[in-house]
């Protein structure tokens, strides 16, 4: 099988990730932070090491400012809902995933306003449109780093600068970029950084996180056992405990650490370069196929890892079904949980066929996909699909 | 190492659980419910099978009424916060874990009242005390099934009957009982059942769930991508999607399914019988040791799997440390995230040393612990500790 659904979750993971998870489960699968015995301390240390690796990756000084969540969506909800209060205004973009749009939309009824800045038909954001949307009650700007539909890279450093000079918190959804693209919370003025563990960081499903800058105060959305200040009925105020209630995904987090170590070993720039090469070659060759429309900026400075396309007016689900059934190529059709992004690029009705590449994809696989698309496009052109 | 910390998380898991998780990760580790390709469908089916197994275990007709969460705490927060509105009243008990007490306490500021019914010094609840606490605005009763401090079994069927006749929703925290004790949401009139995956259900950490009865409407606490109704900015209203945002812990949930199949294979009654035997023997023998005070009802009809104790006025952490360091026995000292339970049994200052047994513990391990406790008690009596 050729797996081009890495934007949903990376597959496979590096072998060392599988191994570390299994070792943690079998050899020290205790409850982290709940007891003081050797095995509990060992899994707690493993979790702390993952925090440190994340800190190193994102240039976060204090690993305790990283809250470990169970997926990126939890981090986004915590950041957005934890920060905004009735009367506040939040700015986001039309390229966002529903994990940003739906929490923001749900807060309308609490009297929290929003502006959704429209991106262009290639998914590009104009920072001055963000600037023009700032109001006196704007408390937060949330943008994705790389679009999950078009692979469009957002100018997050510029937005971070704007947010900083405007005294507004800036939150980045790094669902598609963490592990591929250099993210530096200091240099980029990121106040809240949400990321999944199971995408380009190579951790397992059931992991993710949220970096919270020191001066940012979030309401906790959940309360529960933290293994700290257990005498109190109030949630403890310390980081990260305040936002981490109940049993963590201990072995999963250890596996995430192994994934990040793997990235350091390979070099994030080498990983990105490989994905750029795959993306560039795919765009170049598929762009030549008659009847295929590619979306996004279509150059490597502005687009990474994700390429969506349609073949004339063929249904995106049908094309994806043929790719899967006849060619054993896994892609994702439909709306990709990003309805306004599809509206931006004009594919809200048709959907699109999304190819998303990962570090373990090869040029041979790209060639194979190109041949498959040529054959399918011919069928569509011939009226057979 | 002798592991007596099964109330925190069970260890080890059945081999089949490790194997199924690894197979899911390595062979079909796609994102469930996000794409239509073969591998995505396979992991989605695996998740559905786990829902079905949970339904069979708890006598839940429709597996879609089971929301899969990442731990029991998330399920408890969703049930409690999703149900209660300003002006409502909730009843709970002094034996609850902070995963129940802290969410309830946090809702005070929203104008949600609570009554915490005091249990006796053995952790037992008098149902008539619950009945007396009912007010005209009581909307929810929440109780644990088995105390994580004393192993006290709560009369959940009686409370369920009371709740039903009073028109009040009943929520059970099955953190210590799911997988050991028969739970039947119909017979016991349970409207909301929160459970962890990683305790006696033998799943991995990062799994759990909440059963929601059909007529119960909960506010969703998170919103995000659900892979359904992606064209909408509103969270879809269907179950379980409404309460399951973002990427699920796919391989973990498949592993949870393997754990439940293992329980069906062994027979839940046989599992419980084994834990009853271990508990009974431990209580009987340790009860004879001079200087040791045991907590809880101390009979198998009323207490299961968990036994807490103190040795004179020795610090519980010190005793646990000696058990770990000198005997390689893992237990948990302190307050066990259950401060009011410790107040109920009179150990809020000293804490207690908690032994919690699991299906993989043996009588030999119990004998070994008894010998260790005899030796430590002698040292304490002699003034050496």
Image (cartoon, coloured by chain):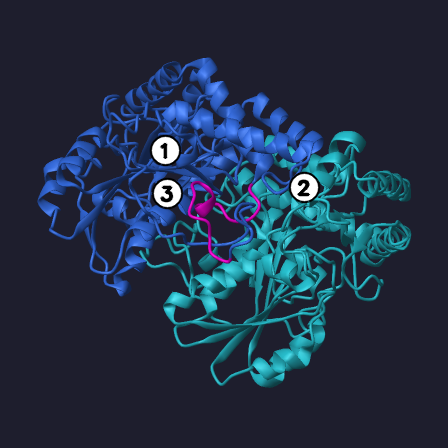
Chain colours: A cyan, B blue
> The N terminus of chain A appears in which quarter of the rendering?
top right
Element at label 3:
helix
Secondary structure mainly formed by the magenta segment: loop
Q: Write down the residue under mark 1.
A: B176
Nearer to me, B240 or B294: B240
Q: Does the magenta segment cover residue B8?
A: no
Which circle, 2 or 3, is nearer the viewer?
2
Q: CA distance from mark 3 to mark 1?
A: 22 Å
Q: Does the magenta segment cover residue B241?
A: yes
Q: Write down the residue under mark 2.
A: A317
> On the same chain: label 3 and label 1?
yes
Q: Residue B159's image quarter?
A: top left
Which circle, 3 or 1, is nearer the viewer?
1
Could you tell me residue A90's position as x and y percent? Answer: 51, 73
Q: Residue at x 19, y 39 (%)?
A: B121
Q: Write down the residue under mark 3.
A: B316
Q: Residues within 10 Å of mark 1 (few under 14, many from 20)?
A: many
């Amino acid at each position: 099988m050729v797996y081009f659904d890495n934007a949903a979750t990376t597959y496979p993971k590096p072998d060392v990730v599988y191994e570390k998870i299994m070792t943690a489960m079998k050899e020290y699968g205790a409850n982290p932070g709940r007891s003081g015995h050797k095995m509990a301390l060992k899994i707690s240390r493993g979790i702390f090491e993952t925090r440190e690796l994340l800190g190193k990756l994102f240039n976060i000084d204090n690993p305790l400012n990283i809250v470990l969540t169970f997926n990126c969506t939890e981090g986004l909800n915590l950041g957005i809902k934890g920060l905004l209060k009735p009367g506040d205004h939040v700015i986001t973009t039309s390229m966002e995933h529903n994990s940003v749009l739906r929490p923001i939309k749900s807060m309308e009824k609490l009297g929290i306003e929003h502006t959704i800045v429209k991106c262009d038909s290639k998914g590009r954001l104009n920072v001055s449109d963000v600037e023009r949307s700032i109001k006196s009650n704007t408390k937060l700007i949330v943008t994705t780093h790389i679009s999950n539909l078009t692979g469009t890279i957002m100018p997050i450093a510029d937005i971070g600068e704007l947010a900083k000079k405007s005294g507004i918190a800036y939150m980045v959804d790094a669902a598609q970029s963490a592990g591929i693209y250099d993210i530096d919370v200091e240099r980029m003025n990121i106040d809240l950084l949400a990321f999944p563990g199971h995408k380009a960081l190579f951790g397992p499903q059931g992991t993710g996180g949220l970096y919270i800058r020191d001066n940012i105060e979030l309401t906790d959305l959940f309360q529960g056992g933290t293994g700290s200040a257990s005498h109190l009925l109030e949630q403890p105020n310390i980081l990260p405990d305040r936002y981490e209630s109940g049993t963590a995904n201990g072995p999963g987090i250890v596996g995430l650490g192994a994934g990040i170590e793997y990235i350091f070993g390979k070099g994030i720039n080498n990983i990105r370069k490989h994905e750029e090469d795959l993306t560039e070659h795919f765009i170049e060759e598929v762009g030549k196929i008659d009847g295929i429309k590619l979306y996004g900026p279509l150059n490597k400075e502005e687009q990474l890892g994700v390429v969506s396309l349609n073949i004339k007016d063929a249904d995106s689900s049908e094309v994806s079904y043929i790719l899967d059934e006849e060619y054993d190529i896994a892609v994702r059709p439909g709306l990709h949980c990003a309805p306004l992004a599809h509206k931006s690029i004009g594919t809200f009705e048709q959907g699109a066929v999304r190819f998303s590449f990962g570090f373990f994809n090869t040029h041979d696989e790209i060639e194979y996909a190109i041949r498959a698309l040529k054959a399918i496009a011919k069928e569509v052109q011939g009226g057979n699909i």
